[in-house]
Image: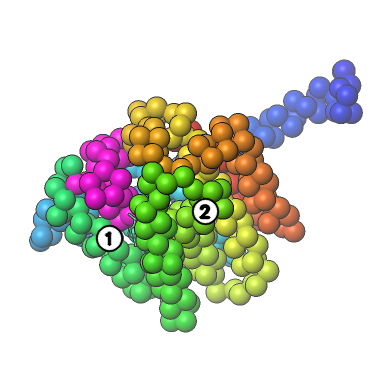
Amino acid sequence: MTELNSGLTDSNLKDLNLQNQAQKASFDAWVANHQARMENVLDAHMPSAETLPTTLHEAMRYSVLGGGKRVRALLAYAAGEFCGAELTTIDLPAASVELIHAFSLVHDDMPCMDDDALRRGKLSTHKKYGDAIALLVGDALQSLAFQLISQNKSLENATQKLQMLHLLALASGSRGMAGGQAIDLESIGIPLTREELEQMHIHKTGALIRAAALLGAYSSAKEDEDKLKAIDHFAKAIGLVFQVVDDILDAEADTQTLGKTAGKDAQNNKSTYVTILGLSAAKQLASELHANAMAALSYYGREADLLRQLATFITHRSF
Ligand code: GRG
C-alpha cells in the first residue's frame, strides 16, 4: 500500500472516490426524481389543451412542459427539505416559480425584447403561436402562479400563504425581475460597469432564484430564523453564480447544447461578465460565488448537503 503526500493511502483514496461517486449518483437520482415530480405537478395544474380557449391552453402547455432544467423548483425543494417541509407542501410554491420563470422566457423571446426563435430546443412560443398568443401565455402563466399558491390545500396557514404571495409578487415585479429586464433593455449597446451589471442581474435573474429558495423555506411550519438567513445568503450567491455561468455558456457553448441561440449577448451588443471581466476572470468569479454560497451553509451538517450539491450543479452545468 503506497502512502501519498496528503497522508492518504491509495486504498483510502479509492474509498473516497467510491464515496464521492455514490454521493453523485444519489444526487443525480434526486434531481431526476424531483424534475419528474415538478413536470407532473405542472401538468396536473395547467388547464388541458382541450379546455376552451384551446389555443391559449395548448400554447401555455407548450411553453411550460417538456423542457427546462427546473433549477428554481429544485432550489425550492432542497430549501424546503432543509427546513423540514413536506414535499407535498412545497409542490405548488415550487411550481409557481417555474410558471413565472416560463412566463418571463416567453416574453423575453418576443421581438420587442430579445427576439429569439429558439427556446428549450424548440421554436419559441411567439414563433409557433404568434405574438398575440405569446403575450397572453405570459399573462396567464403569471396569474396561474399566484392562483396555485393561494389554492395550496397542503398549506392551511393563511399567513404563510400571504407571505409567499408577497415574496413572489416583489420578486417578479418592477423591483425584481421585470425591473431587471427594463434595465437590461435600456442598456443595450451601452457598456456597463461591473457594479451596474451586478445590480441588473440581482433583479433580473437573482430575485426569482432567491424567491424560489425562500418559498421552499416558507413551506415549512417550523420557523427557524437562522436557517432562513442562511438560505437567503446562499440564494443570493447562487442567483449571481447562475448568471455568471449563463454568460460563460453564452460565450462558450453551442446552440444545440444550450437549446437557445448561443452568442446572443455579443450579437445584441450586451455587457456580460465575459465582456467586462474576460472568460478566465468570469470563471474565477463563478468559483468565488460558489464558495460564498457554501460558506452561507457552513454552520450546518449533512442536512444542508442537497443545497450544497445543487450549488455545485448550478456552477458546473453545461447548459
Ligand atoms: C415576469 C414580471 C415579468 C416580466 C417579464 C421578460 C422579462 C420580464 C424578464 C426576463 C427575465 C429573464 C428572461 C431572465 C433570464 C434568466 C435566465 C438566465 C434564464 C434561463 O434560465 P434557465 O437556464 O432556463 O434556468 P431553463 O430553460 O433551464 O428553465
Q: Quadrant of the C terminus?
A: top left
- Tags 2 and 1 in contact by the CB under 8 Å rule? no
Q: Is residue 290 magenta?
A: no
Rendering coords of residue 107 (x, y %): 27, 53
Is residue 164 or residue 202 the one in the foreground?
Answer: 202
Residue 31 against residue 83 in the figure, above or below: above
Label drawn at residue 196 = 2
Relative horizontal placement of residue 88, taking residue 214 as reference (left or right): left
Upstream in the sequence, badge 2 or badge 1?
1
Tag nearer the camera, 2 or 1: 2
Secondary structure beneath label 1: helix
Secondary structure beneath label 2: helix
Residue 62 against residue 235 in the figure, above or below: above
Q: Which residue is drawn at the image coordinates 23% and 63% (left, top)?
A: 140
The residue at which mark 1 appears reads as 141
Rendering coords of residue 191 (x, y %): 46, 45
Rendering coords of residue 277 (x, y %): 57, 38
* Start-end of magenta stretch: 103-126
Residue 202 against residue 311 in the figure, above or below: below
